Amino acid sequence: DKVAAETHIPCGVCWQCRHGRPHTCEKMELFGHAINGGFAEYALIPDRAARKIPQEIPYEYGCLLEPMGIPYRAVEKGGVEGDAVAVIGCGPIGQFAISFSKILGADIVIGIDVNEKRLDIAKKMGATYVINPQREALVERIKEVTENYGRGVGVVIDASGNAEAMKEAFTYLRVGGRFVILGQTDGPLPINPSRDVVFKEAEIIGLFGRRIWDTWDKTERILLSKKINPEPVITHKFSLDDYKKAFQVALSGEGCKVLFIP
């Protein structure tokens, strides 16, 4: 059998697990932290974190079902159908958020990043527009392309963890919009609750991980349907022996999704 791993290993008995939230388990274990990680030819996966995948899904795509579930939840929670969406950060999570937004019916999807290589990938993943804030006036450009959507986006999905970028996003989030936060920041996010949230009736949604196994089921079906092509996101593949180079490529921003092939 082909198997993929859920990296959040729930206990199955705490309040969160017993109430349908194993992804926020109170006694969560993680690969590479509480148990040995996956940088090996073989890895031991607890049965509660193991997922049998269809034979027709190649391993290179099967390993993406775990990270795919995070942006899928963001798009689903955002309610993107018929709306304009901005995705901040075009790393792997952001790239899949762009594709899922189009698949789930968004009219306009805007990819935002300062990395031109990743913006090129975003176009391939379905972005209607891509914006580099270092080269264009971000807010003005978004309001221009969303003229028929209330001069702002109805959904912001942050996959960057950049507090300044998130703060600026409140200026182009439309009244009544939804702000879905996936990225994790090192510091505080300064906002004006009255101006940015109350007067805008903005919804702020934080998401942590996938819904086990709900989002796995949904992303697996999308992969099998071939509505999404992950290939542009997989920019590099390395053997375990080349781990130093792999991390260098990943951390430098030269690549997008970097895979180890044991």
Image (tube, helix red, strand yellow):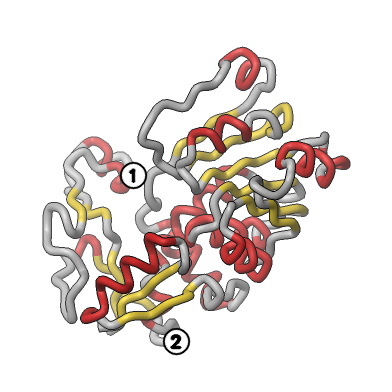
Q: Nearer the viewer, residue 56 or 152?
A: 152
Q: Callout 1: 10 Å neighbours few (<14), some, many (20+)? A: few
Residue at (18, 81) in percent of width and height: 41
Q: Is residue 99 visible?
A: no
Q: Is the C terminus in the top left, top right, bottom left or bottom right quadrant?
A: bottom left
Quarter of the image holding residue 152?
top right
Q: Residue at x 31, y 77 (%)?
A: 260
- Residue drawn at point x = 39 percent, y = 75 percent: 62
The N terminus lies in quadrant? bottom left
For this view, does 212 lie left or right of residue 169?
Answer: left
Q: Residue furthest front?
A: 135
Q: Position of residue 95 (x, y in %)?
A: 56, 61
Report which quarter residue 50 is drawn in: bottom left
In the figure, is residue 119 to the left or right of 239? right
x then y, percent, for residue 246 = 32, 72
State whether residue 47 is above or below residue 101.
below
Does label 2 or label 1 sit earlier along the sequence? 1
Secondary element under disc 1, as helix, strand or loop, is loop
The numbered disc on residue 49 is: none
Mark 2–mark 1 contact, CB under 8 Å? Answer: no
Query: Which residue position holds label 2?
Result: 56
Front tag of 2 and 1: 2
Residue 239 x, y percent position in the rendering = 28, 83
Amino acid under disc 2: Glu
Residue 21 percent across, percent down from the top left = 33, 43
Quarter-of-image position of residue 169: top right
* Residue 79 seen by the camera: yes
Up-down relation of residue 146 to residue 202 (above or below): below
Which residue is identified by label 1? 20
Cα gap from disc 2 to disc 1, whole angstroms: 30 Å
